[in-house]
Image (cartoon, rainbow, N blue to C red):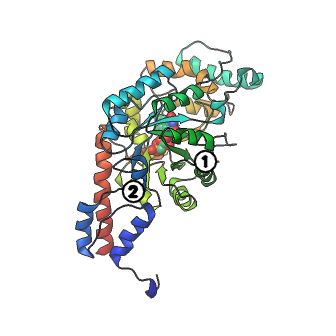
Amino acid sequence: MSGGDHLSRRQLVAGAVTSAGGMMLGCTTTGADTAATLRSDLSFRTPLCDVLGIEYPVLQAPMSRIVTPEMVAAVSNTGGLGIYPGIGVSPQELRSAIEAVRQLTDRPFGVNLILHEDLVEPANPASVAASTLSAVQRTLNGIRREVGIAESTAGPPGFPDVIGPALEILLEERVPVFSIGLGLPSRELVDRFHNEGITVIAMAATVEDCIQLSASGVDAVVAQGSDAGGHRSTWSKRPSADYASIGTFSLVPQVAEAIPQPVVAAGGITNGRGLIASIALGAAGVLMGTRFIATAESAAPEFYKSALVDSSSDDTVVTDAFTGLYARVLRNRYTQIYGESSPMVLPAGMQQIAIADIVSESATRGTGDYYPMYAGQGLGLIQDVPTSADVINAVMEEARRELQGIVERMTS
Ligand SMILES: Cc1cc2nc3c(=O)[nH]c(=O)nc-3n(C[C@H](O)[C@H](O)[C@H](O)COP(=O)(O)O)c2cc1C
């Protein structure tokens, strides 16, 4: 920095964070005093908090078969935003879950739907080539023999048409926040939610897709780095797992520069350091998934929680073998056999239905060998199974401590 641009050390640190995430620092002193002032005055209130009506800029990711109403309420009651996954449940279950969350909290919460093109308009099973179906069933039958269940050559039924009815439920229920994964909503759809007073957030994995989300009028955009657990948030399937595969550190600052809405960083974030780093990259908050799988309120089987705690960041792989769409999971016997056997998968959703017998048997046996254990690369930092409220409190406490440590390291 040239002499004319000189800033004090306090301005350098506080200014960098403030301009990036818009976080309220409340610092009025310089030098050694700064560190002490940071700790007591720091509110962590960013523009994202105002958009969502929350206290802390920390969102719990929607995760099918993991997130419970209890988890959503615990996160929201602690000052973050809990988000219930609306995919994979019947309309009645969705209404009951929203009701259950409302019984447990009067704070804002979200409900998520996956709006992938292939799920909004599910493929006709008759359109699947016979050669694809037999190649997939040949691979699955090898796994079925190993697991000890009946083989099959049948074509699975199509993915049920559930997204349309679910959208209507969210509108009728006037949920506080509608969260979209793997989909580009039309401006009309976003307007319908806005007209009901519902805030809309949506997630994408490339700069270009985040710009498209921004143009659709959503209130905040989640930039999902390739470190993330679960499905890549794209609305059309890419040619291979190498596409839409940009690390959180590279993606977030580009998205923050490209769009006016608050940006939420996702992918590999598990703690307060991740929050501070994300704010420094230009995000106004974080969304964490994998960290919440290993919590008391999580519906994940015990073998899944244990596997997360015992695994390291090198233990994940991106595969379409579980659902037909690319997702980051823990490597296991299923991903190994599938990867060695066949590059063929059925269309989105249909693949998941075709392997349901294998997944169910794995769960019954209490083993993760053939079970989809979605996980992000931050899992090496997960070593315990706390409550969801403890996760939020620990993230905020560590973020305060870490920021103070940064200031101390840079002012000594
Ligand atoms: C088990 C699991 C299930 C997920 N299910 C959904 C989902 O239903 N809808 C969605 O938009 N994102 C889903 N995601 C992706 C998350 O929204 C988020 O991008 C991801 O968890 C962030 O990365 P992290 O897991 O490293 O924190 C899922 C992720 C995981 C790990």
The quadrant of the picture occupied by the C terminus is bottom left
What is the three-letter code of the residue carrying label 2?
Answer: Thr
Pointer 2 residue? 46
Task: State the image coordinates of residue 348 (x, y, percent, origin top left).
Answer: 64, 30
Which numbered dot is residue 216? Answer: 1
Q: Looking at the image, how many numbered discs can be counted on the residues?
A: 2
What is the three-letter code of the residue carrying label 1?
Answer: Ser
Does 315 appear above or below 18?
above
Which numbered dot is residue 170? Answer: none
In this view, the mark in front (1 or 2): 1
Residue at 45%, 28% in the rendered image? 65
Going by the picture, which residue comes out furthest to the front?
Answer: 195
Does 152 appear above or below 95?
above
Residue at 34%, 35% in the rendered image? 73
Q: Nearer the viewer, residue 75 or 141?
A: 75
Going by the picture, which residue comes out furthest to the bottom?
Answer: 3
Task: State the image coordinates of residue 272 (x, y, percent, origin top left).
Answer: 35, 53
Give the quadrant of residue 44: bottom left
Q: Is residue 317 something one can see in this rendering?
A: yes
Q: Earlier in the sequence, mark 1 or mark 2?
A: 2
Task: State the image coordinates of residue 111 (x, y, percent, origin top left).
Answer: 46, 35
Indicate yes or no: mark 2 CB to ligand 1 under 8 Å. no
Does 126 appear above or below 396?
above
Give the quadrant of residue 12: bottom left
Judge from the rendering whether residue 1 lies leftward or rightward of residue 74; answer left or right: right
Judge from the rendering whether residue 56 lies leftward or rightward of residue 137; answer left or right: left
Q: Is residue 315 something one can see in this rendering?
A: no
